[in-house]
Image (cartoon, rainbow, N blue to C red):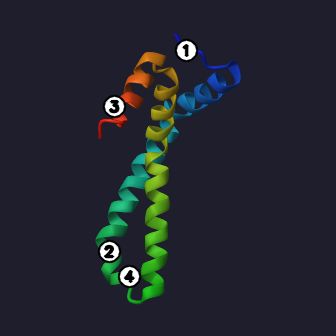
Amino acid sequence: MSNIDPETQKYYNDYFDLFNTDGWIRFVREMRDAKEQDEQTADTRCIGNDQWQYERGTKNMSRRVIGFEASIRDAYDQLNKPEEDLDLEWDNLGQL
């Protein structure tokens, strides 16, 4: 089982509770839809370099929000990996 301290476990549990709510699921879906719409219309909306740079920034932020759940789940999975698996991964890095 996990060697995660109770405070860290609560941190992740709070996020997992959030990710299971209808509101979070709807929010992420709408963020994806908005990002796709923005990408399809960027060429008509962004006529100058400043607008393109702003668009890039908002696109990066959207990507971070949309991928937030996956990054939290990945971090939690890494914390819960058995010590032997982590050692094996580290050993395999030397073979690259």
Provide residue 57's location: percent of width, then percent of height.
49, 69
> Foreground residue, 31 or 61?
61
Q: Identify the residue under disc 3.
A: 92
Query: In this view, which residue lies farthest toward the right?
Result: 7
First reached walking from the N terminus: tag 2 or tag 1: 1
Mark 3 or mark 1, earlier in chain = 1
Is 6 placed above or below 51 here?
A: above
Q: Reply above or below: 26 against 89.
A: below
- Which of the two discs, 3 and 1, sits closer to the camera? 3
Q: CA distance from mark 3 to mark 4?
A: 47 Å
Residue located at (42% from left, 89% from top): 48
Mark 4 or mark 3, which is nearer the start of the sequence?
4
Marks 2 and 4 close (CB-CB < 8 Å)? yes
Q: Looking at this view, is 60 or 77 the one in front?
A: 77
Circle 2 residue: 41
Q: Secondary structure at mark 1?
A: loop
Mark 4, other Cα within 10 Å: few <14 / some 14–19 / many ≥20: few
- Residue tagged 4: 45
Three-letter code, disc 1: Ser
Q: Which of the labelled discs sits on residue 2, or is there none?
A: 1
